[in-house]
Amino acid sequence: MAKPRNFLFICQGNDSRSQMAEGFARNMAGTAVNVYSAGADPRVMNPCAVDVMKEVGIDISTQEAKTFKKIPVGKIDTVVTLSSDADPLPKLKKTKVTQIHWPLNDPAAATGNDAEVKRAFRAVRDEIKNRVQVLLVG
């Protein structure tokens, strides 16, 4: 049996994008991979991220924003950054870790009424879903 891959999704606040990526990867891969997310400046989970993931049948409400201290860094073989200000730990830069960058807009920065904000979250959610599918196949 092949060794599980260990993914770490990072965005600055670990409150939206990386949490959605973690949710999709866990849902799509099951136990075939180990999936983590973290942020340099963790914030409270964004309720819009939770809501739009529920719309596609994935519950991320029990996930929490984490610092890198809660991640088994030595096991990580693939790091995906989802924001330009999300920088992998120096420890990860020195190892043979595959680093991938997905420059996605921060839906938490969306402005407008509730419908417009949700639309921004859905657009990012759908892009993350597509990218996670490709990542797990490749």
Image (cartoon, rainbow, N blue to C red):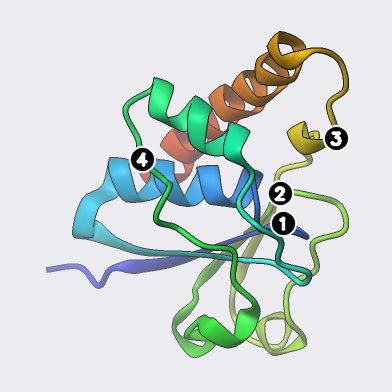
Q: Nearer the viewer, residue 99 or 90?
A: 90
Q: Nearer the viewer, residue 115 or 83?
A: 115
> In whole angstroms, how far apart are the C-alphas of marks 1 and 3?
13 Å
Residue type, label 2: Leu
Q: Residue 119's spot in the image, x, y percent?
A: 68, 14
Q: Quadrant of residue 24?
A: top left
Q: Which residue is mark 2?
A: 82
Q: Which residue is mark 3?
A: 109
> In whole angstroms, how far apart are the C-alphas of marks 1 and 4?
19 Å
Q: Is residue 138 visible?
A: no
Residue type, label 1: Cys
> In whole angstroms, how far apart are the C-alphas of marks 3 and 4?
22 Å
Classed neighbour count for the residue bearing mark 1: other residues with Cα under 10 Å, few (<14), some (14–19), many (≥20): many
Residue at left offset 20%, top offset 68%: 2
The answer to whether the residue labelled 1 contacts the one labelled 3, judged by CB atoms less than 8 Å apart, is no
Q: Answer left or right for 128 relative to 28.
A: right
Q: Nearer the viewer, residue 83 or 113?
A: 113
Residue at left offset 71%, top offset 43%: 102
Q: Quadrant of residue 41?
A: bottom right
> In whole angstroms, how far apart are the C-alphas of marks 2 and 1?
5 Å
Q: Residue 101's spot in the image, x, y percent?
A: 72, 51
Q: Secondary structure at mark 2?
A: loop
Q: Which residue is mark 1?
A: 11
Q: Residue 112's spot in the image, x, y percent?
A: 86, 15
Residue at left offset 43%, top offset 48%: 61
Q: Which residue is mark 4?
A: 59
> In whole angstroms, how far apart are the C-alphas of marks 2 and 4?
20 Å
